[in-house]
Amino acid sequence: MESLEPPLPVATRRRSSVLGYEQSLMFGRYSEQLATFARYQAQKAKEVKEERVQLEKLLRQQQQQTFGQRISRSCRGLIKSGGNWVLLTTLGIIIALLSFIMDIIIHNLYELRDLLSRDLLQTTIYQLLAWTAFTVTCITLAAVIVKLISPQAAGSGVGEMKVILRGVVLKEYLSFKTLCAKTLALPLVLGSGLPLGKEGPFVHISAMVVNQILKIFGTITSESEYESRFLEVIAVACAVGVASTFAAPVGGVLYSIEIVSVFFSVRSYWQGFFAATWGALLWRLLTVWFNFEENITHVFKTDFRIVNPYETLELFAFALLGVLCGLSAYIFVTLQRQIVLFNRKSTAFHAFLQKNTLIYPILVTTIVAVVSFPGTFGQFYGSWLSSEQSMHQLFSNETWGIVDNSSENPIIDNWRTEYTSIYTNTFLFFVMNFLVIALTSTMPVPLGLIVPSFKIGAGLGRCYGEWLAHFFPHGLNPNENRTNLLIVGAYSVAGSAAFAGANTGALSSAVIAFEMTGQLTHLLPIIVATIVATIIAQSLGPSIYDSLIKLKKLPYLPPIMQSSSVAHKIFVEDFMRRDLLYVWEGATYRYVKHLVSSKKQLNVYPFVNSPDSLILLGTVNRFELESLLEKHLNKDRMAEDLSKMQSQEDSECPVHGKRFNVVNVSIPEDDSLEYSTIARHAWEEDQLDQTVNFSSCLIEPAPFQLVEGTTLMRVSDNMFSLLGLQVAYVTSLGRLIGVVALKEVR
């Protein structure tokens, strides 16, 4: 029956529906009580009021930002608008300030050591105890800081930076706590008096500082931007670390190219020189502003003779010095590696040292401190001199061997005793620093090896030059009869550059030596010595950084010498892996599960069309395969399927009606559990036999491919090094026949 009442207007229907009004045939009625409606409206009004209060509070917070927040927002906008230039200027200023503050702390620690061990105590045994206790205390505090805050702060960090710039992510190596640990522990290590340096750690510190700047101001927002801009900025930061400790911007950039960077973009040259110049200039300006220097000068200023600085025949003498430095650097790297391997032996004593990590640095420091005490053996090689003081004196223009022993000389007196001459002391300086640095560089504390390498080479060059001046007082040319023709200090500079170049594998050490000393008169002889030393050391073994990378088993590809003909005769088919693990379109979940669980070190798998043809279609990540398994074998999905099966079995039961008495039979708990386990196992087995659906899986359609005839040189330098590849697939007419990973290329 149709309603005889006319329909209500729209406005009336809207008002009447507020309390749940329902229109009936005769008259309307309210289905909702007034009290319920009132409570609902009150709750709604309360929520609106709370939202308004929160909005007003947020507006007040935005209007009343703290000073730090406003500064941070302004800096973020400035860095984003200024690009890398503002970022690198900030980096140079921060690193220069850190370097200057650290120099002051180290200088004060040296004065404190001399005060405790020499001025306050007069008895030799008490001076020895104070000397040893001070050194051990500093190293122990540094080791405790590294152990408690961040173990990644140990060492120089240059090797790790080489790996990071290759595209490998090392956990915590650029974190804020690693920065704090290295910054706090490094002054203690250098102030203890051990012959170690700060240049290597400052390369790591610069990278960590720029990483924190990028994080704070959020200038990198995507992964693609990270891969390009971040790695370029990190490479430039490494140059700033060297420039702010040597005042050598040119050498710092070249060092970053040679040692740290696998591939240095040409557009980064401007940025590198810009940031390195800022850091070096501000560091030297701070020494003038705080009255440590009268003017901006070179770190180790020399005054070699400009007119006829060397004879032509001396080039052979400098080349021979390069041979000695190359051989010494190879022995140094080998000795340091053997010490590390000795510490890793599986004996009860070594297990005790590895369990108690503080025992080893304490033991090593105690031995070194006792041996280097100036009242005993340390007097024979100037152990009380800092690295800066010893190198200043070794670079001296004066030939020490021709000075009268009866006359007093404040510099030469440090290198002779009543028992020994300058020839013996300079040789002992080289030998003792050689052994001590090789031993102390294995301790788990922040330390650098660039300045120690300069120091060892300077001692060897000085000893070599003094003996040369002793045997050839009138010069190497027999046709000339001139007195004191040889400049012994130049051999010391050449020895420092040659040993550092051979030890680190960087020819830029010669450029750093030029900038440190301010001398270009011996440019050609020093370069000759450095090149000869580097060639000999690289032909015998790896550099100190490559050796540490191998010892730590870091994923890094060492460079192959271009002149090596062997690398051009080895092809991909000679070292590729032929036992392939792959995924294909018709694979089952059981196969995928076995594949993922069998080789847990693999992160990427090749994706082919079928096991027979092996046509490479792309690559799939381990994470994608694990996600497919997790979704397919989901517990909720299993419970839903089992419940459906159970309900289907119940509906198909033939027993119906009320003629039967239903008796509740209690099933033991063990039987029910066994039934559940069997059901789950049967369901999982059924699911594993199903074919995988790769439609929701992300597949990389263009993996990097090689052909069988590609040479090792091309694979190593042009592909894996420059492109930062981890794995490449070898194909023949599209068919997958092998795989080459970074491990095989190494």
Image (cartoon, rainbow, N blue to C red):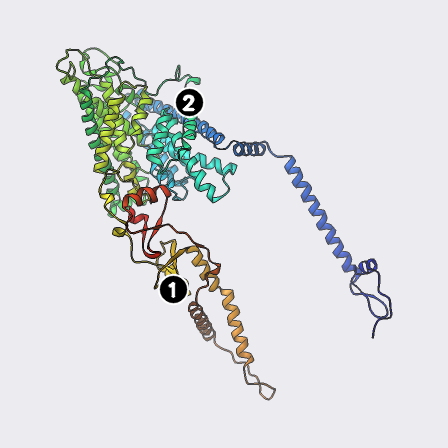
In the image, what residue occupies the spot 60% across and 33% down?
66
Residue 477 coordinates in the image, percent (x, y): 15, 16
Residue 606 coordinates in the image, percent (x, y): 38, 56
In this view, the residue in front, 530 or 183, is 530
The image shows residue 168, relative to residue 653, as above or below, that is: above
Residue 445 coordinates in the image, percent (x, y): 34, 36
Please state which amino acid type lies under the numbered disc 2: Leu
The image shows residue 730, relative to residue 112, as above or below, that is: below
Residue 591 numbered mark, or none: 1
Residue 374 found in image quarter: top left
Give the crowd class for mark 2: few <14, some 14-19, many >=20 residues within 10 Å.
many
Q: Residue furthest bottom?
A: 659
> Which quadrant is the N terminus positioned in?
bottom right
Give the crowd class for mark 1: few <14, some 14-19, many >=20 residues within 10 Å.
some
Residue located beneath label 2 in the image: 281
Q: In this view of the protein, can residue 637 be seen by the observer?
A: yes
Residue 74 numbered mark, or none: none
Please state which amino acid type lies under the numbered disc 1: Tyr
In this view, the residue in front, 197 or 407, is 197
Left/right placement of residue 643 relative to residue 157 reads right
In this view, the residue in front, 104 or 310, is 310
Q: Residue furthest left?
A: 478
In the image, what residue occupies the spot 43% across and 35% down?
233
Helix, strand, or loop for circle 2?
Answer: helix
Helix, strand, or loop for circle 1?
Answer: helix
Residue 639 coordinates in the image, percent (x, y): 51, 68
The image shows residue 539, relative to residue 304, as above or below, that is: below
